[in-house]
């Protein structure tokens, strides 16, 4: 039976790339002293209606919403920021406090599946609360930059930045935009006509050619940004310049979610076709209040793990696809228990040696073939003579090759040393 459309199976062959990406994201966030949280996959539908916004694509048409047995309307989370803010607010952790947290896992959106766009996809989210910036905005962007560096994709992504101004200037701009667009209403694409009433800022990033032409003549968001917001944004740009972080200002960048204020950004690549945004974020100073808390400055981003895996595979370094480091050959099935015991000792080495023990018996020759196919560096051969002598016959499967016998301790130490050297 096929799986459900848009839901992803990540098969073993893709595991190395997923692990590499997840490890880099988690390690870099940890190196900035951010703390991981775990959040539920299911929330009250009202959380997203309020926290993401009724007029967004997500709430209008992308949510997996259902009634549970009590008739409560629940939704599979389409994003993590609203849940994260809710959880910290519920726990009383946003009151006069600073938080720097991360979370990751699957998100669900009913979209048209294609390369880089799925109905179940994974995000790595980073959120900060209680910090007004712009220094924290800079910290978040530096964190992204370090993630891309460690993934080997820096040359394939660019940072696009914009400011939405404060809540006030956004309201005034929204009105000016509606006033400008209304006379053209019938020329706009269908989505944009609808958004004129619900979420006019989204019209700015319409991909429709005629709409884009009309939008080109619209008043710019920048001309509505007040002095304070301008100072925030200039401060951000100055710090980025000092740090050597390259950014393009994109005056039409507005992002899909309602809760953004001030800084918004996206990291974009042209290596993946249409689904080019690998990470998006910014400031959302209004969110916590929307959820019933006190006004709390906040900023963060969400990286799309699926897209980062695709990007890493396209432009990043080749990965070690071996299934194990040591393939343990058992020439005589009657010694398999002894082999299990020894193999387990090697697995406990702090170097983290991956040991696969041959199972199912069979001829030496076939076992050696399996050892080769596993991608292992070494085959360990332990037959009755080796066991009696406390030795292991070690065969090198890569490079120069060669085979010799040595004590168990020597064999373990050598493998641990070489694995650490390459790992
Ligand atoms: P898009 O414009 O591509 O729909 P978005 O603005 O809806 O993106 P966000 O809500 O900001 O995306 O999510 C942050 C990141 O999560 C995106 O930049 C992208 O990398 C990833 N992402 C979003 N939706 C999907 C999806 N359906 N499939 C895979 N990745 C996604
Ligand atoms: Mg989207």
Image (tube, rainbow, N blue to C red):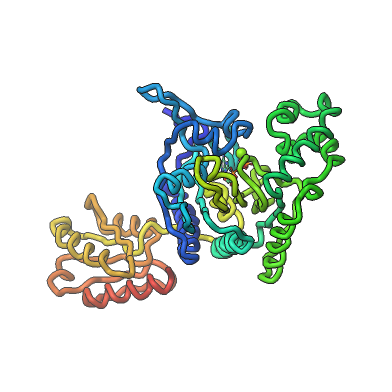
Up-down relation of residue 322 to residue 66 (above or below):
below
Quarter of the image holding residue 243? bottom right
Q: Position of residue 175 (x, y in %)?
A: 77, 36
Up-down relation of residue 410 to residue 363 (above or below):
below
**Going 69% across and 59% down the picture, which residue do you hit?**
232
**Going 47% across and 57% down the picture, which residue do you hit?**
97
Ligand 2, image quadrant it occupies: top right
Q: Position of residue 333 (x, y in %)?
A: 17, 56
In the drawing, does residue 22 fall left or right of residue 224? left
Quarter of the image holding residue 134? bottom right
**Going 77% across and 46% down the picture, which residue do you hit?**
221
Q: Position of residue 66 (x, y in %)?
A: 45, 25
Quarter holding the C terminus?
bottom left
Residue 153 visible in the snapshot: no
Quarter holding the N terminus?
top left
Q: Position of residue 198 (x, y in %)?
A: 68, 30
**Going 25% across and 71% down the picture, which residue do you hit?**
393
Up-down relation of residue 389 to residue 262 (above or below):
below
In the drawing, does residue 329 fall left or right of residue 44? left
Q: Nearer the viewer, residue 240 or 6?
A: 240
In the drawing, does residue 261 fall left or right of residue 360? right
């Amino acid at each position: 039976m096929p799986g459900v459309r848009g839901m992803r199976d990540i098969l073993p062959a893709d595991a190395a790339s997923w692990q590499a990406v997840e490890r880099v994201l988690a390690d870099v966030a940890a190196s900035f002293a951010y703390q991981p949280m775990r959040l539920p996959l299911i929330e009250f539908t009202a959380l997203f209606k309020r926290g993401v916004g009724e007029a967004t694509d997500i709430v209008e048409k992308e949510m997996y919403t259902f009634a549970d047995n009590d008739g409560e309307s629940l939704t599979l989370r389409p994003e993590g920021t609203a849940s994260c803010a809710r959880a910290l607010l519920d726990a009383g952790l946003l009151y006069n406090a600073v938080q720097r947290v991360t979370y990751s896992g699957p998100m669900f959106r009913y979209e048209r599946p294609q390369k880089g766009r799925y109905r179940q996809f994974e995000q790595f989210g980073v959120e900060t609360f209680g910090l007004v910036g712009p220094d924290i905005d800079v910290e978040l962007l530096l964190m992204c930059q370090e993630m891309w560096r460690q993934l080997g994709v820096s040359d394939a992504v660019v940072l696009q930045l914009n400011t939405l101004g404060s809540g006030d200037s956004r309201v005034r701009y929204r009105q000016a935009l509606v006033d400008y667009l209304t006379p053209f209403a019938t020329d706009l694409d269908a989505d944009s006509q609808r958004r004129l009433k619900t979420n006019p800022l989204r019209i700015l990033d319409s991909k429709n050619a005629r709409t884009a032409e009309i939008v080109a003549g619209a008043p710019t968001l920048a001309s509505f940004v007040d002095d304070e917001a301008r100072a925030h944004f200039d401060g951000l740009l100055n710090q980025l310049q000092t740090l050597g972080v390259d950014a393009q200002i994109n005056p039409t960048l507005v992002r899909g979610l309602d809760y953004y204020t001030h800084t918004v950004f996206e990291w974009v690549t042209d290596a993946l076709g249409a689904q080019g945004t690998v990470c998006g974020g910014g400031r959302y100073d209004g969110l916590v209040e929307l959820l019933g808390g006190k006004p709390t400055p906040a900023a963060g981003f969400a990286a799309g793990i699926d897209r980062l895996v695709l990007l890493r595979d396209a432009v990043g370094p080749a990965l070690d696809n071996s299934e194990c480091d040591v393939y343990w050959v058992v020439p005589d099935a009657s010694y398999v228990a002894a082999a299990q015991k020894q193999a387990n000792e090697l697995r406990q080495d702090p170097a983290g040696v991956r040991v696969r023990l041959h199972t199912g018996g069979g001829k030496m020759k076939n076992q050696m073939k399996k050892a080769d196919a596993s991608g292992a560096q070494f085959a360990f051969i332990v037959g009755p003579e080796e066991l009696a002598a406390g030795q292991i016959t070690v065969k090198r499967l890569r490079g120069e090759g060669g085979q010799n016998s040595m004590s168990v301790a020597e064999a373990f130490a050598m493998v641990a040393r070489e694995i650490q050297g390459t790992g």
